[in-house]
Image (cartoon, rainbow, N blue to C red):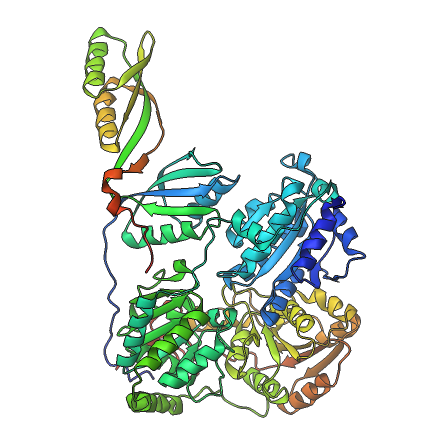
Amino acid sequence: MPKKRGADIVIDVLLEEGVDTVFGLPGGAIMEVYDALFDAPLRNILARHEQAAAHMADGYARATGKVGVVMATSGPGATNLVTGLATAYMDSIPMVAITGQVPTHYIGTDAFQEADVVGITRPITKHNFLVTDIKDLALILREAFYLARTGRPGPVLVDIPKDITQQEYDYKMPTLKDVEDALPGYKPHYEGNPVQIKKAAELIRRAKRPVLYVGGGVILGEASNELRELAELTQIPVTTTNMGKGSFDENHPLALHMLGMHGTYYANMAVYHSDLLIAVGARFDDRVTGKIDEFAPEAKIIHIDIDPASISKNITVDVPIVGDVKNVLQKLLKELKKKPVEWEDARKSWLKQIQKWKEKHPLTYQKSDKIIKPQYVIEEIYNITKGDAIISAGVGQHQMWAAMFYRYNFPRQFLNSGGLGTMGYGFPASLGAKIGKPDKTVFAIEGDGSFVMNMQDLITAVQYRLPVKVAIINNEFLGMVRQWQQLFYDSRYSSVCLAVQPDFVKLAEAMGAVGLRATKPKEVREVLKKAMEINDRPVVMDFVVDREENVLPMVPAGKSYREMIVSPKQKSEAETMYLVG
Amino acid sequence: MVEEIKAIKVRPQPKSETRKHIIVVRVQHNFGVLTRITSLFAGRGYNIESLTVGKTHEPNVARITIVVEGNERVVEQIIKQLRRLIETLRVRDITDIPHIERELVLIKVHAGEDKARDEIMRLVNIFRAKVVDVSVDTYTIEITGDTEKIEAFIKLLKPFGLKDIARTGVLALTRESAKEGLQDNKVE
């Protein structure tokens, strides 16, 4: 084989891994790779900020299930990736980040644009590498892809000094076996212990008040069909986390929707009263459990997860099953079918009780024909897209409304930063999603605070003619912080007022996008209709909404489900505390 | 609103005592692997009492012995997080498995007067330690043993005035004679 330049080896591996799109921004240390990209059959989406590039790669990965690739130069290019990597790491999103580094002989000399990127990103990546020898380059890159997409997925970073991208080497493409041999300690459990699966089946047969508690693992593990089969067979209601949305059709009669801090009344009541909780690809996050001592106090817990470290981390479980969720659910179904039970009879009274809870406090809000309610905007987005759009959200009140008032029915439909809670995520992620799924309508539901954190990349959307629909839920506040200040800090609105902000319509127009605005409820539908007709560039919709609307229900942080605030009338701490009979 | 909930119920949480654990980790000996381990401890707020690293007979495999204090729950998390590192080959908590535990310590102690010199020599003999350097007013002593023995020896030397101490940290190997105890701490 003829010798190849390091930069060309990088491109070769990307092609070998089936990559057709990378997201990034060039700079000094990664110029050689961008030079190789120039005539490669790969496209680079030129983001205007590396953080946005990382979120684009993340959105692309979440929407397609493929590994998202982001590239940046050394120093500030790489440090700008940090938030994007941490976001992907918390939500277990498969990503590979390739960063340029100063030449090998300059490392450690405080050279221009030098930063210890491997050191900085160590705790926020599944693994990372610094390439020190061109002989290792191809193997390391292949290891990075392998690690990113197998086991519990996550972002992997490869830092390549500039001289290595410039050297030439007579290399051979490493095989999968080479990769596995290079990682002798990396052996994800896929199978699931049969004894534990048997135990789980027995608990399910005996349970009177079971609930399935489902997280993002079901989406990552492509196990939605198995989940539906299990729920329908055993007649167990399903509640999902924010990350699990889309894994189970939310219009299904067994759907309880989201649980936890902003979970539905009926989901939280069902979990609180359950005698068996089956956690599937979820990790008992504090936003889910609230006060851990009082979380599902009477339930036995079955926990299915691919990561042993997630099990019994926050809560002690009775039947842990380490394995790939799809694989484990298939085996569990097989086991359950061996000894069938009269499931419908067994669940009758439990499902009836849940129905009562659903009727008592359905997910709702106070409607208005004078002022736009943020929830109304989400409902109208749902209606106009017929529930079929991919929705990506920023972080804050609008994110929760997008989670609550859009009904998700397929996996990879709802993209948001569940773990890290990264403001500014939604819009750039929507660009990645649109690139990965060009035939889908993609909405970015953003807050006015969240959107401005990455709005510079509107120009990227215009450049690549990405017709994403950006719906800004504009309440001129950092709304979630304001809500907490109102509820827990005596309405002292410290540094949350965003009354001074750009004219989003003009801003969109200045960028070459379309800008629309609705200030009255009757204008909402019209604006959405117009937006849906535009197919050659992004649309920014400014929905001026009720400024002090709160996200409810709400379980205050660290509190028990019994302290849930259900209606907007009970605002004070005192009222909520006396909810216990 | 949540009137269906009549009485406060609490999930029973298992209790366990805090004690010293010896964790043995075998890793691929790549550069940066030690940083990964120490930053894992630092980032999650676990306290390392001692940590020793060395090559093994196998190429590119290093062995790390870590002593930590914690209850079962914390130690289980530590072990799982260590296993999660890509370069980790094997992790074992050998605290409750029969094992040999040794630490090597160099101690520089004041020994100016004859009386002190005699007394220190007696202790050195009793503890089967060794004087490895002598100056006009100090002895430097080498001692190996388990933590208990070392602590006892240091305590007895303290009144003479300690000038400096260098400790390797604990090294440990399981006893081959107790092979049936050698099971990996699996989650399941």
* Number of numbered discs overlaid on the protein picture: 0
Tell me the quarter of the picture where residue A65 sits.
bottom right
Identify the residue shown where x is 29% and y is 71%: A199
Query: Residue A244, percent across and down?
Result: 48, 74
* In the displayed structure image, the side of residue B188 where residue A74 appears, left or right: right
Q: Is residue A295 visible?
A: no
Q: Is residue A289 visible?
A: yes
Identify the residue shown where x is 76% and y is 75%: A513
Residue A575, above or below A557: below
Residue B110, above or below A149: above
Q: Quadrant of the C terminus of chain A?
A: bottom left
Query: Residue A2, percent across and down?
Result: 76, 45
Q: Nearer the viewer, residue B175 or B102?
A: B175
Query: Residue A251, percent across and down?
Result: 49, 88
Query: Residue A446, percent across and down?
Result: 61, 73
Identify the residue shown where x is 69% and y is 90%: A526
Question: In the image as oriented, which residue stretches furthest toward the front?
Answer: A1
Question: In the image as oriented, which residue stretches furthest toward the right?
Answer: A39
Tell me the quarter of the picture where residue A458 sits.
bottom right
* In the displayed structure image, the side of residue B136 where residue A398 appears, left or right: right
